Amino acid sequence: MASYDASLRVWRGDEDGGELKDYTVEVNDGEVVLDIIHRLQATQAGDLAVRWNCKAGKCGSCSAEINGRPRLMCMTRMSTFGEDETVTVTPLRTFPVMRDLVTDVSFNYTKAREIPSFTPPKDLQPGDYRMQQEDVNRSQEFRKCIECFLCQNTCHVVRDHEENKEAFAGPRYLMRQAELSMHPLDTLDRRDMAQDENGLGLCNITKCCTEVCPEHIKITDNALIPMKERVADRKYDPIVWLGNKLFRR
């Protein structure tokens, strides 16, 4: 495909407000949206703010909304769009805008600090335990997360309801709780924690987080739903409830 001039619409502004501005930028064969944003910076908008790092889909830095869909700019090829189509690039909607395409994602780091780390038995010594491969496989999928925060951005529980942010950790960190809960040596009971402190009950499993994950992690099916099932067993199974009453210290 020969080069062509693409119509690009980019949000420009800061925390006080802004607007979409139209540009015409050259596109060459094989280029991605981040290439075009860089060319825009180099030729027409030298003060355009954009966050990026690896340009290989592994750092999660260049998250944005492209034609309304949360994506990584470095993994979205311009060939996805028609040559006569206007490509609109806007910042992640769920988080406060700092400037142009850069948002303040500190919400996510705050939630990360609320999740207790892996807690093995106190008397376990290095080399005392060998994990079975099935235990490794169970949580390996979740470790592919690059923390692009696209799942956090698209989750309507925080996207559309600012008041939920304090009580809801979001899919990325509920997935972290599920991953640790699956570890055979983690000594913390994370079920009540996920439900009462991280807002697991607010998730209504629409799978929007799974749909935007660039690593194709099945967040809903393999992490959130199993965690909800464990919480339900703990809180609502009559046999478990009776056992807790009879044997509670």
Image: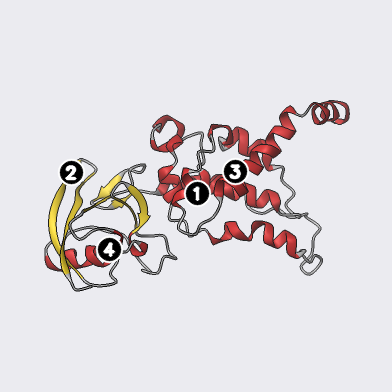
> Looking at the image, do the residues carrying marks 1 and 4 touch, with CB atoms under 8 Å apart?
no
Q: Amino acid at mark 2?
A: Gly
Mark 2 → mark 3, Cα distance in angstroms? 36 Å
> Looking at the image, do the residues carrying marks 4 and 2 touch, with CB atoms under 8 Å apart?
no
Mark toward the viewer: 1 or 4: 4
Q: Amino acid at mark 3?
A: Leu
Q: Secondary structure at mark 1?
A: helix
> Looking at the image, do the residues carrying marks 3 and 4 touch, with CB atoms under 8 Å apart?
no
Mark 1 → mark 2, Cα distance in angstroms? 30 Å
Q: Secondary structure at mark 4?
A: helix
Q: In the shown orientation, is residue 23 left or right of residue 117?
A: left
N-terminal-most mark, 1 or 4: 4
**Quadrant where the N terminus is found in the figure:** bottom left
Q: Secondary structure at mark 2?
A: strand
Q: Which mark is residue 210?
A: 1
Q: In the shown orientation, is residue 164 left or right of residue 42?
A: right
Q: What residue is shown with label 3?
A: 224
Q: What residue is shown with label 2?
A: 18
Mark 1 → mark 4, Cα distance in angstroms? 23 Å
Q: What residue is shown with label 4?
A: 78
Depth check, front residue: 213 or 109: 213
